[in-house]
Image (cartoon, rainbow, N blue to C red):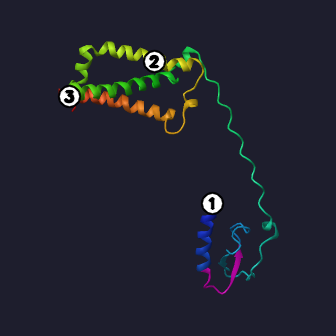
Amino acid sequence: MAASASMQSLLANSVVYGAGKSRSARVIHLVPANRYRHMVVRSMAENGQEEQSSSTIPEASKTPPPPRTPTPSPPPPKKVSTKFSDVFAFSGPAPERINGRLAMVGFVSALAVELSKGQDVFTQISDGGVSLFLATSILLSVASVIPLFKGVSVESKSNGIMTSDAELWNGRLAMLGLVALAFTEYVKGGTLV
């Protein structure tokens, strides 16, 4: 509504200034009369048409606008399925979240070990990192799946900056970062830093 009124006021101003040079003008009301009483749009009469005098604001437009209806409350959240096949479906809530959480932990820990010990990712894995990776994977997977099987959706716990979408994007970027780190170290033949 505000954008429409702004555009109409721009149109009205440009038409009024252009029409001021003419001999005859007729009044056309493009904007709501109750809000912009001082604005009048004038245009030139075309050849062959009779000149019309300025008319006053129609009585119908002097009535106040109808009261605004209150906005309805949002619909209740939909039920979340707790079936194993739904939770672990390709588009289900578990796979991408678990992989993203593991990638975030893996990326940060890989960089931390690389900075502290000077080992690349492949050396970290071969020096006993597999058992630590498996233990972390099992712990985070179980911790991520328990609320989903209880019917708690991730979106219901989202607020402020820490939203479920932000977690998904951080997980996606961490997955890409972990792969890029391993690939760069493989091509370079050593640590990244």
Residue 134 rendering spot, x and y as whole percentages: 36, 14
Residue 44 horizontal/vertical position (percent): 65, 80
Residue at 51% of width from left, 35% of height from top?
Answer: 163
CB within 8 Å, label 1 to label 3: no
Q: Which mark is residue 191?
A: 3
In the image, residue 144 lies at what x, y percent? 49, 20
Is 137 on the left or on the right of 69, as rendered?
left
User: Which disc number belongs to residue 176?
Assistant: none
- The Cα–Cα distance between marks 1 and 3, rounded to whole angstroms, is 57 Å
In the depicted structure, whether residue 100 falls above or below residue 48: above
Q: In which quarter of the image is residue 113?
A: top left
Q: Which of 129 and 52 is in front in this view?
A: 129
Residue 173, given in percent of the width and then of the height, sits at: 38, 33
Report whether 22 appears left or right of 135. right
Task: Write down the region rendered in magenta.
Answer: 18-28
Residue at (33, 15) in percent of width and height: 132
Q: What residue type is labelled 2?
A: Ser
Secondary structure beneath label 1: helix
Give residue 128's quadrant in the image. top left
**In this view, the mark in front (1 or 3):** 3
Quadrant, the N terminus: bottom right
Query: Label 3 near label 2: C-beta < 8 Å?
Result: no
What type is the residue that disc 1 sits on?
Ala
Type of amino acid under label 3: Thr
**Mark nearer the N terminus (1 vs 3):** 1
Rounded to the nearest whole Å, what is the CA distance between mark 2 and mark 3? 29 Å
User: Which residue is label 1 attached to?
Assistant: 2
Of mark 2 and mark 3, the one earlier in the sequence is 2
Q: Which mark is residue 141?
A: 2
Q: Could you tell me which quadrant the C terminus lies in?
A: top left
Q: Is residue 31 magenta?
A: no
